[in-house]
Amino acid sequence: MCTPMAKLLLIESPGKSKKLSQILGAGWQVKASMGHVRELANDGEDALGFDLLDNRVECRYEPREARGQKVLAELRQAVKQADAVYIATDPDREGETIGWHLQQALKLKNPQRVVYSEITPQAVQAAIAHPRSLDQSLIAAGRARDCLDKLVGYKGSKHVVWRLNIGAKSMGRVQSATLHLLCTREKEIQAFQPHDYWSVWVEYQEGFKAFYRAPTRPQSRPKAPTPGEPPDDAAEGKNSQESDQVTSQAEADRLLAIARSTPHQVATVEGKTTTQAAPPPFITSSLQQAAGTKLRFSPDKTMKVAQSLYEAGHITYMRTDSVLLAAPFCASVRQYLEQHDPQNVPQQTTRHRAVKGAQEAHEAIRPTAIDRVPTQLQTQLSGDEAKLYELIWNRAIASQCCPARLRKTRVVTCSGAINWEARGQVVEFPGYTHYWNNLSADTQLPVLQQGQGLTLKQAAADKKQTQPPPRYTEPKLVQLMERKGIGRPSTYAPTIKTLKEREYVQVEKAKLQPTALGMELDNALETLLPDLLQPEFTAQMELALDTIAQGKQDWQGYLTHWHRTYFAPALEKAGQLLLSKGMQPSQLKGAKTNPKPAKPPGTVTKTACPKCGEAMIKVPSKSKKLKADHFLKCGVAGCGTAMFWNAKGKRYELPYAQRTPDPETFTNMSCPVCGALLERYTYTKDGKEKVMLRCSLLEHRRGKCKDVAFFESREEFWSPKFGTLKLETLVT
């Protein structure tokens, strides 16, 4: 219960509660909204939950499931007993929108908005001392995104995707554009025609190799990767040194014959010293890329681990597209380097160029304290947390170090009219690479003089075959999404996760490969809604949302105009095309499908689908996992809801993970691990019905909260790990 006249801090995640309570001290209560508490209702036209009028959007919001109702009820009680309410949701557009929903649902007249990017005493106290009002422009952009995504997802899915009858469940504004990137690459792979070529080289007694260079070779060299980026997929595991391609065995033999019969000498020796600048500190996309390349983390896992580090106060907020670092942090890094690595202190504080469109008010991802070195936290963090923290710490300190200094050498030798080239690189001063090494290994050439004769050791040609363009890894897809403007930092990981859950893509050998269903859906959408698949079109929508966030555009006018001038006509045209093609995806542009024969229909039952209300169909099944010889499936294309027989309860039920929690089972006690509410769970043991308390979040029960179990024992609940809860303290 909230102490009378206390100050109330409203946050999103319960994982932050303990840390913030310690920082704020007595006189404060910290309550979590558990993320979103309200969402657009599923009513009205196409269950959008909002109406598009001339230049207005009328939205109808409702609590997010039973948990949202429970949380809001608790928060209302806390608000009644507080003399001041501070909203401290996450420091981004989505966090601002959640803050607005809290203000509306709790009827807060003058909430104080506080923003911090790290959970440290200094940052939190400074935020409390300088509150502001909720940013209406950011809220407008957040509401516009919610409506836009639901408009595209619900209308596109219902009026286009479901009518295809191919088993696809949904489309989405960001989801479909991202799928198109993968499918486009897959088509390039399928169309690729390999051909043989030969890499011709010579090796000298003087101790180096040189590769054949054609006389008409282009002078341009491949662009070097951006500092700090993972290597390109095409270069992974591949020898970077090759000759210019020789396309026939006869030509390779001719070159080898000349190499073996003609004296060799040094034609030119070029040497220069260059520098390579330190990479910028992490933003969301580069963190996901680096964690994927170096730690083999998926983007989703990276963000979950980063969230736990943020909530514990170890790193700054992890959803950002800014490479800026706070001046005090830069000063602390400089001081650290002066004490531990003085040669790596640059003359001036390093500044990194921001990505176009980045929100400069944010900071990059960094440790909250540079002197909290990774080795000091080994015992406090889990294995994954320790690995990711070390990655973030190293990248942050590297970003403030001196450039690396390289000595590069290029030697051209000749035998008759044929030129051979060798390249070398030596790191003269490691600079930032002491903390973040993104350079290739040294290749040192011997000291040579122009005109010097050389002794041939061997000449050879390696037969090779051209390779198709590679499929994207998850980190490379994130990089591509960022470059093309598809989505924003908060959407990269959820988008890829959705594509996998919808079975539009699968992971094969650490690469993302579209499934037959994904390819079929993309082929159909390429004909029916082609604009929505184009990165430029999607990027323009993101820029419009950014303009709204800056207060330069009215969100309701933008959304109604976009729907009236583009989306509604596009849906109508797509419907006409579907009718003209008889709704056969195989007749649509570029489709190469082998549709599976339809299964014989089952028996229509009187049981209504719990999601859409239509009649369920009884489908026979021989699966040994089921406790009956059938299950129920919704007959509406695209719904896909299934229910299974519960012999004990003598009723059909949704799969456990899909059931809506019963608010009657919730207690007012928090999970000791994640802070979510504990719920009562009834089970049978030794023929007796028993009750236990457990975390109410299913995804947590399968992971970090799996050991949270309080067993009923007389007048209390007892846990072997977390101790005792008195029965009278529980409210249900």
Image (cartoon, grey):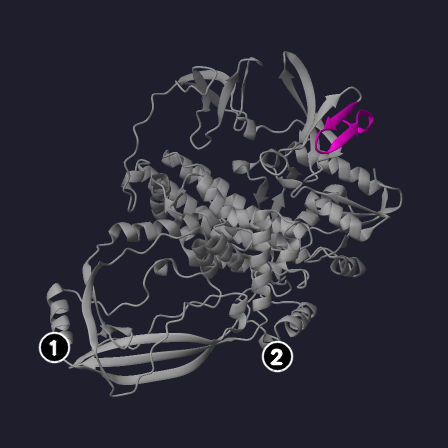
* Residue placed most toward the observer, 397 or 503: 397
User: Residue at left 51%, top 69%?
Assistant: 433
Residue 455 placement: quadrant: bottom left
Q: Does residue 260 appear anywhere in the picture?
A: yes
Secondary element at image label 2 = loop
Q: Nearer the viewer, mark 1 or mark 2?
A: 1
Name the residue carrying label 2.
348
The percent coordinates of residue 110 (x first, y second) are: 80, 52
Secondary element at image label 1 = helix
- Quadrant of the rendering where the N terminus is positioned: top right
* Magenta-tinted stretch: 716-732
* Residue placed most toward the observer, 51 or 589: 589
Name the residue carrying label 1.
261
Q: Judge from the rendering whether residue 691 lies leftward or rightward of residue 261; answer left or right.
A: right
Q: Does residue 556 appear anywhere in the picture?
A: no
| Total number of numbered discs in the rendering | 2
